[in-house]
């Protein structure tokens, strides 16, 4: 009788051991991996939103310029175009759920290429979306070329 009781106690201890092991596996392995996957997804979504806002601001900038201003060839060197793009970009980024402040905005006119284009560069600080810790932020650089339509 005593031998049967000790076998059942060892089975109960093994079951409790499995439950504790699975609990700690979830807490220390699976939960951090899922948080990392969620943060990577949030990073990708925010980068897509920033890219879309940047391109929409470039389109609005081109639509606001007159054909005469485009034919001058030097509008990219004037600070008012850079300031105008900054205002348009900030208005587009204000619709995002995260506060993004673009810095070091550069707008360069490249009329000498096969298709005239505008090079746009700026940086912003990306903060971790899930933990909101300022120490976990990094500087992101946005750089793209917007080719003008042929009729310009």
Image: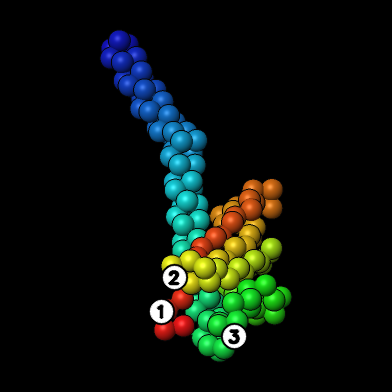
Q: Position of residue 84 (x, y in %)?
A: 65, 80
Residue that appears at 56% across and 55% down: 130
Left or right: 89 as drawn, with respect to 150: right
98, above or below 63, in the image: above
The mark that comes first in sequence, 2 or 3, is 3
| Residue on which disc 3 sits | 69
Q: Position of residue 19 (x, y in %)?
A: 40, 32
Q: CA distance from mark 3 to mark 1?
A: 15 Å
Q: What residue is at 60 percent from the left and 81 percent from the top?
A: 72
Asked whether residue 51 appears in the rendered view, the answer is no
**Percent position (x, y) of residue 70?**
56, 82
- On screen, residue 148 versus residue 9, left or right, reads right
Q: Is residue 95 above or below residue 1?
A: below
What's the CA distance linking mark 2 and mark 3?
17 Å
Query: Which residue: 43% across, 29% down?
Result: 21
Closer to the chain start, of discs 3 and 1, is 3
Name the residue beneath numbered marker 1.
150
The vertical placement of 82 against 38, above or below, is: below
Classify 10 Å Cα crowding around label 1: few (below 14), some (14-19), many (20 and above).
few
Residue 115: which numbered mark, if any? 2
Q: Is residue 19 left or right of residue 109?
A: left
- The front one of 19 and 26 is 26
Q: Secondary structure at mark 2?
A: loop
Numbered circles on residues, count? 3
Q: Residues within 10 Å of mark 2 (few under 14, many from 20)?
A: few
The answer to whether marks 2 and 1 mark residues whose Cβ atoms lie closer than 8 Å is yes
């Amino acid at each position: 009788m005593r031998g049967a009781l000790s076998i059942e106690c060892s089975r109960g201890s093994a079951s409790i051991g499995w439950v504790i092991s699975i609990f700690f596996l979830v807490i220390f392995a699976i939960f951090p991996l899922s948080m990392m996957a969620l943060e990577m997804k949030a990073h990708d979504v925010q980068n897509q939103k920033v890219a879309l806002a940047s391109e929409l601001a470039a389109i609005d900038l081109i639509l606001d310029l007159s054909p005469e201003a485009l034919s001058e060839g030097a509008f990219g060197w004037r600070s008012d175009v850079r300031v105008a793009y900054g205002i348009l970009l900030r208005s587009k980024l204000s619709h995002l759920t995260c506060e993004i402040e673009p810095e070091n905005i550069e707008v360069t006119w490249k009329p000498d290429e096969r298709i005239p284009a505008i090079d746009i560069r700026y940086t912003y600080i990306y903060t971790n979306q899930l933990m909101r810790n300022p120490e976990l932020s990094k500087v992101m650089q946005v750089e793209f070329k917007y080719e003008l339509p042929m009729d310009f």
